[in-house]
Amino acid sequence: MYQKILNQIKPKMQEVIDKLSESFRNLRTGKANSALVENIFVTYYGTKVPLKQMAQISIPDASSVVIQPWDANSLGDVELAIRNSEIGLNPSSDGRVIRLSLPPMTTDRREELVKIIHKIAEECRIAMRNLREDAWKEIRKLESQKQITEDDRYTAEKDLNKLIEDYNLKVNKIVEDKEKEIRTI
């Protein structure tokens, strides 16, 4: 009976891990990456459109991103959206393409990014603890309604803690990999 609760929590936990990975992908690590700009929303004919749906994004070298809009008339809109985004890069346009140059990261900026990573990871862990708490309440409710025995509750608690531990290890691995990537010069 409690297995159903555990099976329902697993996809939610995986969703939290996926969101963590996605937010880490958008962090600038000193190397050019299309993920830096592809989810920037551009106001295009009154509609907000992700940049990846309206332009070709290429990475010619490790320190630059080239954006070529499919519609040349949207070049100004794309440039404005990049300027207004939180990526902190200044676009330069030659009338056909937009170039973004990534400056080398300072040691202070790397340490700042590591702190941001740990903050995001902690938010992820909090979300998983909240999911665990909800599942635990459901398991105790089943016990109080006499749908599971006390032994089942102990087994469920052990399984639930094991599940949380496994997902926390995944979070730690993702954080460790990203931290190593940021600290690499």
Image: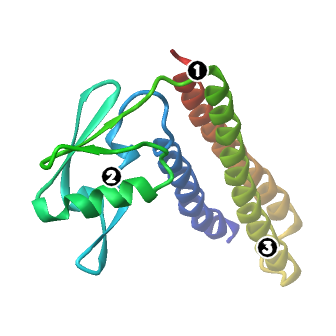
Quick check: 24 left or right of 72?
right
Categorize mark 2 by other alpha carbons within 10 Å: few (<14), some (14-19), many (20+): some
Q: Earlier in the sequence, mark 3 or mark 2?
A: 2
Q: Vertically, is 8 above or below 51?
A: below
> Which label sits on residue 148?
3
Q: Residue at x 52, y 49 (%)?
A: 23
Q: Which residue is situated farthest in the bottom direction here?
A: 145
Q: Is residue 11 left or right of residue 33?
A: right
- Quadrant of the rendered image containing residue 93: top left
Residue at x 79% of width, y 65% of height: 133
Is disc 3 in contact with disc 1, using a CB cutoff of under 8 Å? no
Q: Position of residue 24 (x, y in %)?
A: 52, 43
Q: Pick whichever of labels 1 and 2 is earlier in the sequence.
A: 2
Label 2 sits on residue: 38
Task: Give the amino acid type for the residue marked by disc 3 in the picture.
Answer: Ile
CA–CA distance between discs 1 and 2? 24 Å
Mark 1 surroundings within 10 Å by alpha-carbon count, few (fewer than 14), some (14 through 19), many (20 or more): some
SS label for mark 3: loop
Residue extending furthest toward the top: 185
Q: Disc 2 residue type?
A: Glu
Residue position for label 1: 183
Q: CA distance from mark 3 to mark 1?
A: 50 Å
